[in-house]
Image: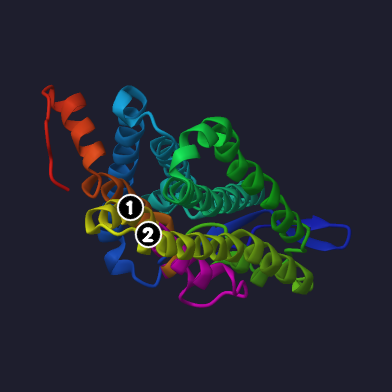
Amino acid sequence: MVVTQMEGSNGTFVTEFFLMAFHVFPRFTILLFVVCLVIYITCITGNMIIFLLIQFDVTLHSPMYYFISVFAILEILFVSIIVPKLLDILIAGGNRISFAACFLQLYCAAATGIVECYLLTVMVFDRHLAITNPLRYLVLMSQWRAQLAIFPWVVGLVSAIIPTIFTVTLQFCGPNQIDHFFCDLAPLQNLACSDSYISNLVTSITATFAVLLPFIAIIGFYINIIITVSKIKSAEGKYKAFSTCSSHLIVAGLFFSTGIIVYVGPNGSDYDKFFALIYKVFIPLLNPFIYTLRNTDVKMAFFRTFMGFKVKNIKA
């Protein structure tokens, strides 16, 4: 592999990187390309359908579905930052990426990841408020809905700047082969010629703020939800309350379990890119199906909108 460098006053500086992706499995390159392409197309299509359904079907014009529509757009951005370049690497060997493009991808991937963590927290807060304070829920959410939707984006876009700056200011003067399928914090920090201790520390602190803090908040909200629901006397009431949280619980559990493994320990391991493949590619594929197949309202809206007839009742 050619190492592209540029001479500087204090030595040489890397001007581009090489994303190695899954080069150790050359026999599976075509298969992986086909799988990732199908997943990408399905993910984009599924999330776009959910977004359009919520926009055009008046029965879905509620705070919960408003947040799901924002989540659908986020998922489209989330996968589009990573998967197109991965497909290019797999089918065309386009593993070169410029220094600037690499860190732009790093920032965008980190920002959308943090946004997703906090948006999932906002979504469980919405369910928490609906269950624990149903009489004031609509009034409160009509006042806070826009602010709650914007809040995760502000947190993600701002907080992702910090580890990105601390990483981009490291000196890269030697190896430029990234053992990953996208530019991520730990693989880049491991390539630095200068001491990356401060950068690793900042990444750990940011990961705690971005991943662990919302994860703990989600656990806290669910504990309170369980306590509240347990006080409901009727079995039907309990089932109805829990059913509104089940889809979110599955999505959040899948996303945070892999995210914590990769980012709370930022020094990196040989398995990080495989866990990253799960939460960057496979989990976004599952989300549209989780929110539709388990949701009667969305299924009914789908049949009304795309099948052209009325549906009186569809069992979940």
Confirm whether residue 22 shows in the render: yes
- 283 vs 170, nearest the viewer: 283
Q: Is residue 95 magenta?
A: no
The residue under the point 47% across, 42% down is 74
Counting from the top left corner in percent of width and height, residue 171 is at 77, 63
Inspect the image, locate mark 2, and give the three-letter code of the amino acid beneath it: Val
The residue under the point 60% across, 75% down is 265
- 268 vs 237, nearest the viewer: 237
Question: Where does the N terminus fall, quadrant-wise?
Answer: bottom right
Inspect the image, locate mark 1, and give the three-letter code of the amino acid beneath it: Ala
Helix, strand or loop at mark 1:
helix
Magenta range: 252-274
Does label 1 or label 2 sit earlier along the sequence? Answer: 2
Magenta residues, dominant SS class: helix
Counting from the top left corner in percent of width and height, residue 2 is at 58, 62
Give the crowd class for mark 2: few <14, some 14-19, many >=20 residues within 10 Å: many
Helix, strand or loop at mark 2:
helix
Residue situated furthest right in the rendering: 9
The answer to whether residue 35 is left or right of residue 121 is left
Which numbered disc covers residue 128?
none
Reading the image, the residue beneath label 1 is: 241
Counting from the top left corner in percent of width and height, residue 287 is at 33, 50
Label 1 with label 2: CB-CB less than 8 Å: yes
Reading the image, the residue beneath label 2 is: 229
The residue under the point 37% across, 51% down is 284
Q: CA distance from mark 1 to mark 2?
A: 7 Å
Q: Is residue 28 above or below residue 92?
A: below
Q: Is residue 261 magenta?
A: yes
